[in-house]
Amino acid sequence: MGPKRIAGLISAVMLAWAPFSARSTAAVEAGAPPGIDKTVLPYASTEQSARLPDGRTIHLVCMGRGGPVVLLTAGGSGWSVSWAKVQPAVAARTRVCSWDPAGLGLSSPSPQPQTSDVMASDLEAALTARGIDGPYVAVGHSLGAYVSLILADRRPRSVVGMVLVDPSLPDQTAIFDRVTPAQQAWMSARPGPVPFLEKCAAALRSGAVRPGSPDPDGCLRAPDWPPDWPAGFRAALNRAYVDASPATTAAALATIASNMKSADRDAKVAINPHRSYGAMPLIVLTASEFRSPPDYPDAAKAEIPAFQAEWRRGHDAYAALSTRGVDQVVPNSSHDMPDEKPEVVIDAIDKVVDEARGAGQVR
């Protein structure tokens, strides 16, 4: 995989070195021409970032008022802007906060392995630092569901509702090794951007790559941000990336790589045979379609029905964690539901918020 393609893959996650101000983004909004996506602007300010005891910052974006507080956790290598089509609508009903895991979006890199239990600890520390008390409705998409589950396990009195958006399954690596071996073999043969990120981090740390020096792999190449993002926003991101110190860029790349390769361990971390949520409002949203990549092998395609059956079985098990749990298959939907079917996600969150309020769990 060449550096140009890799740069495109990591564009959506390489904001850790973009400490631009709310003032600059306000100027961007004022001068943005028609056709520019302004929905990203609330996610561009560090005004609400939380400083942790170790000096790192975790970026929070909170909107709205009231309780319970809805906590939005994006899927693997995603960050707060992943919820741009969902969060403003939810904010009309209650307070809602999205966040950037370490090394992603506007959050600081971290020296710790980026597993879901570590990410949940960072989220808890950020909420404490910002004084954002429960009760909470935990919302997680894909791998982000693990963080929601762990948070509910740790804070059973604070988490009063949950929405899991096409969630990953506990121990799913072992499950799919057994049920869909061709799919797993195909995935294992595709290293993705992790080797590139780790190679670049090592080169920056050693001084082999530095600003102004030859950069044959494109380690310091500015990402291609979405073209409908405001030009000033993209320019600020590029300036911050290019001007970042080698140590900062190396730390960010290493953190992103750790996040990307944590899925197998996360599937184990998410296991909890004693998990039970009583009568907590819980909605699981399940995608109805599996859209295979163009180069998906025939053997893996033949396993799609088995994959979907296991996926649905796991989601039914999630719903069974609560006596009020529901697994809802969303017609004409794929895995990327927050972007493709935001209205369905919004409706599910609203229902859980209303149920939590009706149960008297919100003062």
Image (cartoon, rainbow, N blue to C red):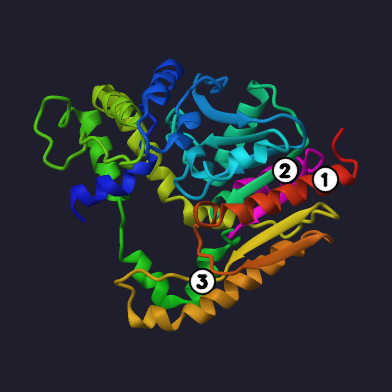
Secondary structure beneath label 3: loop
Dot in front, 3 or 2: 3
Image spot of residue 341 (x, y percent): 55, 57
Contact between labelled residues 1 and 2, with CB atoms less than 8 Å apart? yes
Q: What amino acid type is highlighted by mark number 3?
A: Glu
Image spot of residue 291 (x, y percent): 43, 70
Query: In the figure, 147 relative to 295: above or below?
Result: above
Residue 28 visible at all: yes
Mark 1 neighbour class, 10 Å CA radius: few under 14, some 14 to 19, many 20 or more:
many
- What separation in Å lies between label 3 and label 2 (alpha carbons)? 27 Å
Q: Residue at x 51, y 54 (%)?
A: 265
Residue for badge 1? 356
Image side of residue 197 versus residue 58, left or right: left
- Quadrant placement of the N terminus: bottom left
Q: What amino acid type is highlighted by mark number 1?
A: Ala
Image spot of residue 170 (x, y percent): 61, 60
The span shown in magenta is 147-166
Residue for badge 3? 289
Which label's residue is closer to the chain start, 1 or 3?
A: 3
Residue for badge 2? 137
